[in-house]
Image (spheres, helix red, strand yellow):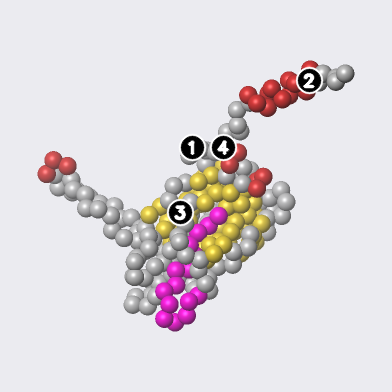
Amino acid sequence: MALSPRPWVALVALVALVAPPARGWDRDAPTATLSVTNGGHWGHWGDPEFCPGRGYASGFQLKHWGHWGDPEFCPGRGYASGFQLKVEPHKGFFGDDSGLNGVRLLCDHAGQATSSEGPRGAWSRPESCPPGQRLVSFRLRVEAPRGLWDDTAANAMAAICSGGSLLEGRGGPQGTWGNWSLPCPPGAGVCGLRTRLEPPQRGGDDTGLNDVELYCCS
């Protein structure tokens, strides 16, 4: 005669079925936003907008070109412990290089987070912190505007882990490294990102990904 399962086994199975999934980070979770000052400037003009009621403008604000993608966060309230870069290989003197096209955060428990991503290039090998550490700061390698010559904007990213280790992504060769961002506050770590991307130019000069912001959570 088959033995009936123990009561506690049945209770564990029931809890597993009805328990809600772990809540992830939301847009109110970040305690700080990390940014750099040398991001690229390319993009395109949006639609014309006019003052309401036949009014006149009494001031203005400037905005970098390109479109910021939606903020994306590590699932399950996880933290980023590494990253990957999507990079288009150098195409030679007569080719249109776009450099960096995407950044992917590698999170706890095999999670990932990616914001806006360009169509060109391939993902490089992962760069990861030592076990138990998180990303806390970053910088970008960006090519300055070149006038009539081919522009690429952002080409690579590097990051610092909470234990001090330096990670440098395998990006494109163009450009120079800018300053490091401020670090996450004590006890916090990178939990999400958003990226600024120039849309494909349809025969024009593509620059791909122009800028990155990382979010810190605790």
> What's drawn in magenta, residue-wise?
90-104
Q: Earlier in the sequence, mark 2 or mark 1?
A: 2
Q: Is residue 159 magenta?
A: no
Q: Mark 3 sits on what residue?
A: 116
Most common SS among magenta residues: loop
Q: Earlier in the sequence, mark 2 or mark 3?
A: 2
Q: Are marks 1 and 3 in contact (CB under 8 Å)?
A: no
6 relative to 124, above or below: above
Q: Earlier in the sequence, mark 3 or mark 4?
A: 4
The Cα–Cα distance between marks 1 and 3, rounded to whole angstroms, is: 20 Å
Identify the residue shown where x is 62% and y is 42%.
78
Identify the residue shown where x is 35% and y is 61%.
43
The Cα–Cα distance between marks 2 and 1, rounded to whole angstroms, is: 39 Å
Question: Which numbered tag is attached to residue 8?
Answer: 2
Q: Mark 1 sits on what residue?
A: 28
- Name the mark nearer the viewer: 4 or 1: 4
Q: Mark 4 sits on what residue?
A: 24
The Cα–Cα distance between marks 4 and 1, rounded to whole angstroms, is: 11 Å
Q: Residues within 10 Å of mark 1 (few under 14, many from 20)?
A: few
Is 93 in front, or is 193?
93
